[in-house]
Image (cartoon, grey):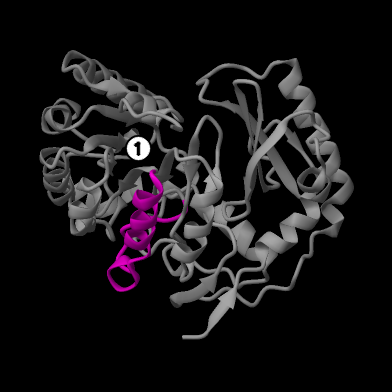
Amino acid sequence: MERTRREVDDRVRELLAPLLDARPSPLQWRLVGWDAEQGISLTLERGDRVLLIELEARDDERDCHARTARFNVCARLAFREGEPLGDGERRAVEQLVAMVRSREGRLPEPPRAAAASGSEVREIEVDRLLIPEGNGHYYLNPYVGCMIGCAFCYAAERVDLSRGLEGLAPRPWGRFVDVKINAADVLRREVRAHRPGIVRISPIITDPYQPLERRYAITRQCLEVLRDGGFTPVILTRAALVLRDLDLLASFPIAAVGFSVPTDDDRVRAQFEPGADPIAARIDALARCHAAGLRTFAAIQPALPMDPARLVAQIAPLVRAVRIDRMYALPRALPLYEAAGCPEAATPEFFAATASVLREGFAARGVTLDGPDDLAGALGLTGPR
């Protein structure tokens, strides 16, 4: 297979050049990190406040902080769940929006080939992998795209925006993966340049243990580099394949592994996540990770039709923390609910009632309820040493 170099970073650098090149930042915030794999995202830091700004494809039907000709601009404070932006944060976002409006015409709009239905695996070479996100936290994606292919995944549109900037043909979610074939070499260089901290390896735009990991072992190679560099991994997956690396994970001073377990009913799982491992396999793998001494957690996200009390009973003895969240792609997911015979579960009322039982059950068993960012805190992990 011929290798190719990813071009999207080069194209986004032109858009963000005044911010990337300026010293100090013209926004009076320090640019911590940026990414162009799931739309365009920037993390800014000032003192102990971390500001996350994300550019998505323009969609006038979606709420956002501001719009430009090509983008919805979303902004929030990281590690401060629910706290509104202050005056300083709003000014920083407004300045960034003004910069994007003045420069977005520089972004190419390459013609895209007609939509393709087959699967595509590209071996790509990257020049960045470890993305800082403030407070001693990082994330990395061993792959872009996911052959598990959950139809409701809210990352699909964001990843397609990034693919469009390269002129790649649209493909259904679950039918393309970019394999970062030189990931370990790049990461080896990066860990020497960054202070050790907590590295999130989680299924937003990929699952680190999707089936291709059996062939390429990119995730395992990255874990070996992180261990040698003194970093702490936090892995979230839907796949029991993580057990292949149990020996490696147990060799870290601290490592965390979590599973997405959105229901206790495997018939529901088969409707919503037909490409993913059965629920029983995930819970068994979670139990084995727990028994091996890893920090374990679960993500009930999105909360699908379930018996919440039963799910609590199955998971609570195996985890330190859980994250509970709703379905974010309801328009795209609604046919799944209808096919499963449970359209009533695609409502805010269903989520509120289900989440209430889950939260009460986990809290009664001493399991920490995690916010959207600081999972490391919920697991008792530490930041940079």
Q: Identify the residue position indicated by label 1 in the image.
A: 301
Give the dominant element type of the magenta stretch: helix, strand or loop: helix
Is 185 placed above or below 65 here? below
Is residue 224 on the magenta stretch? Answer: yes
Q: Answer yes or no: is residue 337 visible.
A: yes
The residue shown at (74%, 62%) is 11
The residue shown at (23%, 16%) is 363
- Give SS at disc 1: loop
Q: Nearer the viewer, residue 314 or 178?
A: 178
Count of residue discs: 1
**What are the residue bounds of the magenta stretch?**
205-230
Q: Amino acid at mark 1?
A: Gln
The residue shown at (56%, 48%) is 193
Tell whether 345 sits left or right of 146.
Answer: left
Across and down, in percent, residue 167 comes to 67, 71
Is 86 placed above or below 102 here? above
